[in-house]
Image: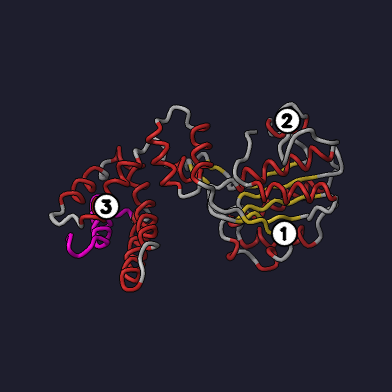
Amino acid sequence: MTSLYGHDTEIAAFSDAIGSGRMHHAWLLTGPQGVGKARFADMAALRYLAEGMGPVSAPGIEVPAEHPAARYIAAGSHPDFQRLERIFRDKTNDYARNINIEQVRGLQGLFATTPSFSTRRAIVIDSIDDLERGAANALLKNLEEPPTDSLFLLVSHAPGRLLPTIRSRCRVLRFGPLADPVVGRILRETLDDAAPDEIDALVKAGEGSPGRAMGYAGLDIGTLDRAMDEIARTGDPYNAARATLAKSLATKAAQMRYEAFLQRVPAFIAARAKERSGPALHDALGRWEEARNLAGGAVGLSLDPQGVVFELATILSGLAPKAAR
């Protein structure tokens, strides 16, 4: 398992809890998507299980790859560990919408037997936001009366939507966006074939989230950003730039770039809004909401991609100074 970068405070908090012998039974890991919460949860669970077998000679929450606990988890066969996530459905080639109640009830099998390698058990749920209502209620029973030496690591991108009774039983660990140099380091290690200019564009598009940045890899996101910047700067008075952009993203081959554009436009406008105040800020926020609503429903409603791109580019063009329009 690779190292976790940029979350020294969170690593220290968990390490201190293990070292003190006063480990809280449930941790709620909150923050933006793609910043490393799930990786932290997996690494923390492994460290907790490994230390149950004896001292671990590695810093923070790392565990050497040759450690028995690490080998078992890598093979997906550690008897004292379970990871709940949405099930992949082969028939439809997609993921289930939720983590269902049967998956949560399946944890009882883990708790009904004596742990194999130590007294400890660990459960990662990625993400708890995906639990259907019945599953959340079933999990709550385990959090209210946790089995001895059992650790729950719950990943959440939107903790405000969780049952208050679940939040109240967890120690919250908040993860923020990573600094650009850290994101760049992660991307260079992960995308070893990517050119430096692509890495730079991905870092900018990621906005502190390596996961988001890697989702844009290979999509020439820099070109999309430059096109958006031109339209927002000049107002594209003759519609040429927006027409070219719309045509380039309308083909089936461009579907992934089209979906990336849908994600990027609201973020692009939000970034410009931060630079404004007064009426200009109010206008930018209105454009952000309009773009978010259109982009958010475009794929689900099967809207015409060329028309959607042109309309979003028109929203962008309104950011230009009036003298440029």
Place of residue 312 in the rendered image (x, y in percent of width and height, measured from the top left): 28, 57
Q: Please tell me whether mark 1 sits on a helix, a strand or a loop.
A: strand
Q: Amino acid at mark 1?
A: Arg
Task: Identify residue type, mark 2.
Answer: Pro
Quadrant of the image containing the C terminus: bottom left
Q: Quadrant of residue 73?
A: top right
Would residue 314 be counted in the magenta stretch? Answer: yes
The image shows a total of numbered marks equal to 3
Q: At 77% across and 50% down in the image, what residue appears?
A: 151
Q: Which mark is residue 82?
A: none
How packed is label 3: few (under 14 Cα within 10 Å), some, or many (20 or more)? many
The numbered dot on residue 171 is: 1
Q: Which residue is mark 3?
A: 309
Mark 1 / mark 2, whichever is N-terminal: 2
x, y percent for residue 91: 50, 40
Please say if the residues under marks 1 and 2 sit with CB atoms less than 8 Å apart: no
**Would you name the residue on which mark 2 appears?**
64
Residue displayed at 38% across by 36% down: 198
What is the magenta range? 302-325
Q: Amino acid at mark 3?
A: Val
In the rendered structure, which disc, 2 or 3, sits on the residue that comes first in sequence? Answer: 2
Binning the other alpha carbons within 10 Å of mark 1 as few (below 14), some (14 to 19) or many (20 upward) gives some
